[in-house]
Amino acid sequence: MLRLSKKADYALMAMKHLALRGDRGSSSAREIAEQYDIPIELLAKVLQRLVRRGLLASHQGTRGGYQLARMPLQISVADVIQAIDGPVTVTACSTDEATCDQFAKCNVRDPLWRVRERILAALGECTIAELAADVPAGASQAAVLHRGPERAALR
């Protein structure tokens, strides 16, 4: 099973939170952490990594906090995951590095690379705007954004 890291999960939760805020200003790391029961220290590191990758903008001061650096339609789930976890991999040889002992003779390497490309394409097509639009009727935003770890699995 492929699974997102907790950091990537928290990053997506924060990105959706900020997309839902729209033009209503920025949100602090503390505000987001408290709303979704995320450890503040971990979320602060995740948000800073998203800033360094150009997905978020941060502002200092009393009205400071974080905002999306681009429109939600311009940020893909793949952008967020790769900003946090690095390249998406399916096997040990999913990168261009030939570190596997069976690399030269492997008979599933190329098909699995194609699987990886399909996964990346699917994650690249799904945007933060699409995540933000997915609010089931009668559910609070906190309930929608904070599901159990099984939500993060790609099946």
Image (cartoon, rainbow, N blue to C red):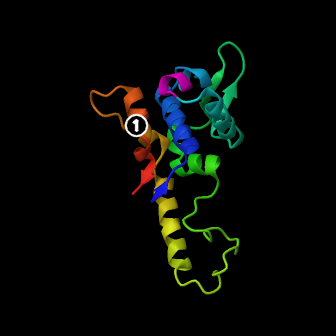
Q: Name the residue at 45% across, 60% down.
A: 1
Q: Position of residue 109 (x, y in %)?
A: 56, 78
Quadrant assignment for the C terminus: bottom left
Q: Name the residue at 49% across, 23% down.
A: 35
Secondary structure predominantly adopted by residues drawn in magenta: helix
Q: Quarter of the image holding residue 32?
A: top right
In the rendered image, the residue lying farthest to the front is: 101
Q: Position of residue 105 (x, y in %)?
A: 61, 87
Q: Name the residue at 48% across, 35% down.
A: 16
The residue where tag 1 is placed is 147
Residue 106 appears in the figure: yes
**Label 1 environment density (alpha carbons within 10 Å; few <14, some 14–19, many ≥20):** few
Q: Quarter of the image holding residue 11?
A: top right
Magenta region: which residues?
33-37
Looking at the image, residue 45 sits to the left or right of residue 109; the answer is: right
Residue 8 vertical position relative to residue 19 in the rendered view, above or below = below
Q: Quarter of the image holding residue 110?
A: bottom right
Q: Position of residue 80 (x, y in %)?
A: 57, 46
Is residue 52 in the magenta section?
no
Q: Nearer the viewer, residue 74 or 82?
A: 82
In the rendered image, the residue lying farthest to the top is: 62
Residue 64 vertical position relative to residue 57 in the rendered view, above or below = above
> Element at badge 1?
loop
The tally of labels here is 1
Q: Name the residue at 65% across, 29% down.
A: 41
Type of amino acid at the residue the image marks with label 1: Arg
Q: Position of residue 66 (x, y in %)?
A: 62, 27
In the rendered image, the residue lying farthest to the left is: 137
In the rendered image, the residue lying farthest to the bottom is: 105
